[in-house]
Image: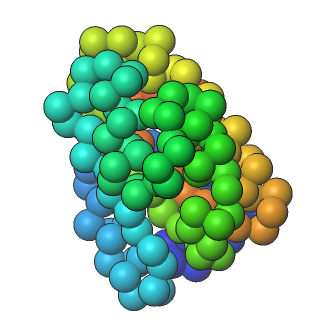
Amino acid sequence: MLSDLLTRPDRSGVYTLPPEQQGVLTAAATSAGIALLTVDLFRCRTAASVLTKIGQALKFPDWYGANFDALNDCLGDPEWNPAPTLIVRFDGLKTLHDAHPESLATLVEVLQAVADERRSAGCAFWLLLDTPARGVAILPRA
């Protein structure tokens, strides 16, 4: 069952979420009481606009500088969101991929580093991308 998988820190990380799994994921998170945050990036064509939108959507603190280092610091800070299980869904990354694939690659590197850090602290931290990226597996079904 997907909700059982989502509570396992050892399996959490950065994954691609195929469109056909979005409804299943939302239902599983809701039924398990897992926080699901969504970031709409459909109109973001640059790393700067993606980073700004992420900070706004996730309600990062005022000191967030909308750069990759600050993204790492905010997502990696357990005080930002202390939930033991957390899902962040990034929608619309194809726009960034098409305009600046190197920026998407850097974003994925940062997300993977944060996921590793949070996992080692015992947090089931899921960062789900709607666009395939190099080195990112598809979310397991269970």
* Residue at point 47%, 49% (across, down): 62
Using residue 128 as the reference point, say whether residue 74 is left or right of it.
Answer: right
Q: Residue furthest left?
A: 43
Q: Position of residue 28 (x, y in %)?
A: 40, 77
* Residue at point 74%, 47% (across, down): 116
Q: Position of residue 83 (x, y in %)?
A: 59, 75
Q: Where 86 falls versus 16 (above or below)?
A: below
* Residue at point 67%, 56% (across, down): 77
Q: Where 92 falls versus 34 (above or below)?
A: above
Quarter of the figure with residue 42: top left
Q: Is residue 42 visible?
A: yes
Q: Nearer the viewer, residue 77 or 37?
A: 77
* Residue at point 25%, 46% (across, down): 40
Q: Position of residue 125 (x, y in %)?
A: 61, 60
Q: Nearer the viewer, residue 41 or 101?
A: 41
Q: Position of residue 41 (x, y in %)?
A: 26, 38
